[in-house]
Image (cartoon, rainbow, N blue to C red):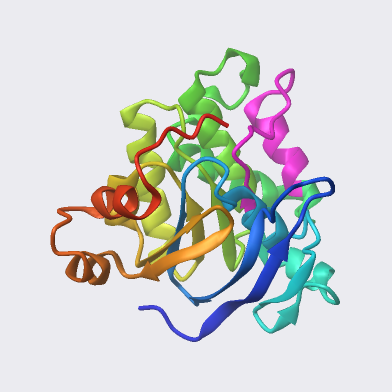
Amino acid sequence: MPGKTIIDIAQLTKIYKGAEKPALDNISFQIAENEIFGLLGPNGAGKTTTISILCGYLSPTSGQVTIDGFDLQTHKNDIKKIIGVVPQELALYSTLTAYENLRFFGHFYGLRGSPLKKRILECLEIFGLENNAHKKISAFSGGMKRRVNLIAGMLHNPRVLFLDEPTVGIDVQSRNVIINHLTAINNQGMTLIYTSHHMEEAEKLCSRVAIIDNGKMIIQGAPQELLKKYPKCINLEGIFLLLTGKELRDL
C-alpha cells in the first residue's frame, strides 16, 4: 500500500524560450511511496516536460521539487542515485548487443563485475531475452528493444522509476510482459511514475492518476474515485475525453 510522500511537486512552472505560453503552468501534486502514479494527458500537455524536470534533465522556470526529502535544485546528485529513467525514445546503441548495452548502463550506475553480470542475466531472463543476450540491438524487434530499454533503467534497483510511454508501439505480448513486471517490482516496494496514452492500461495499473492539459493540472485521484465523480463515464478514457476534449492533437 502507498505510504509517506516520496515526491512533492509545488507550483512547478516551465516556460521555454520564445514560447507563447508555459509548457507547465503552476502544477502541484504529491506521489506516495510505493505508488504507481499515472501522469496522463494529450500530446503536448506537458507530461514529458514534467518527467524531464523530475529526472533532472530540465530546470524549471519556478517551483520546487523534492524527492525522498532531497531538494532537486540543491541535491541533484543524491536524487540521481535513487531514481531510474525509462525514456520514451530508445536509449540503446544499435551496434552493441543487448548484454553490451546493459553492461554499459550498469557501469553508468556504478555496478561492476559478477554482481552486474548476474543482474543483467537475471533481467534478461525475466523479460524473455536470455537467448538474445549476444545479438545486436539492430536485429531486435520493437518489443524486444522496449524490454531492453526498460531493463537499462532499472538495473540498479532504484527506489523511484520514471517511465515515459514504456509500452508505446509494441505488440500485445511484449506489453503484457512489461506490465506484469512493473506490477511485480511495485509489489516489491518500487515507486513508479508512468505516462501513457493507453487509458485502459493506466486504469488497471495505476493506484492514482493525474490528468494534465495545456500545462495545467486538470484532475487527480484514484481511477475508481474519478469514475464515481463522473458517473456518466464508464471508464477512464471517457473521463479523459470529457476533460480534455475530442479535438485532434497532432503535435
- Locate residue 241, reporting x and y percent: 32, 47
- Locate residue 174, reporting x and y percent: 39, 32
Decide which of 84, 111 is in the foreground and name it: 84
Total marks placed: 0
State which quadrant residue 11 falls in. bottom right
- Position of residue 21 relative to residue 166, above or below, is below
- Locate residue 8, reporting x and y percent: 60, 78
Decide which of 184, 124 is in the foreground and name it: 184
Left or right of 192 on screen, residue 88: right
Report the quarter where the N terminus lies: bottom left
Q: Is residue 88 magenta?
A: yes
Q: Residue at 36% x, 46% y: name it.
A: 245
Q: Residue at 58% x, 32% y: name it.
A: 251
> What stretch of residues is rendered in magenta?
85-106
- Locate residue 144, reporting x and y percent: 50, 27
State which quadrant residue 167 falls in. top left
Decide which of 128, 141 is in the foreground and name it: 141
Residue 131 is at least partly visible in this image? no
| Name of the residue lying farthest toward the front | 20
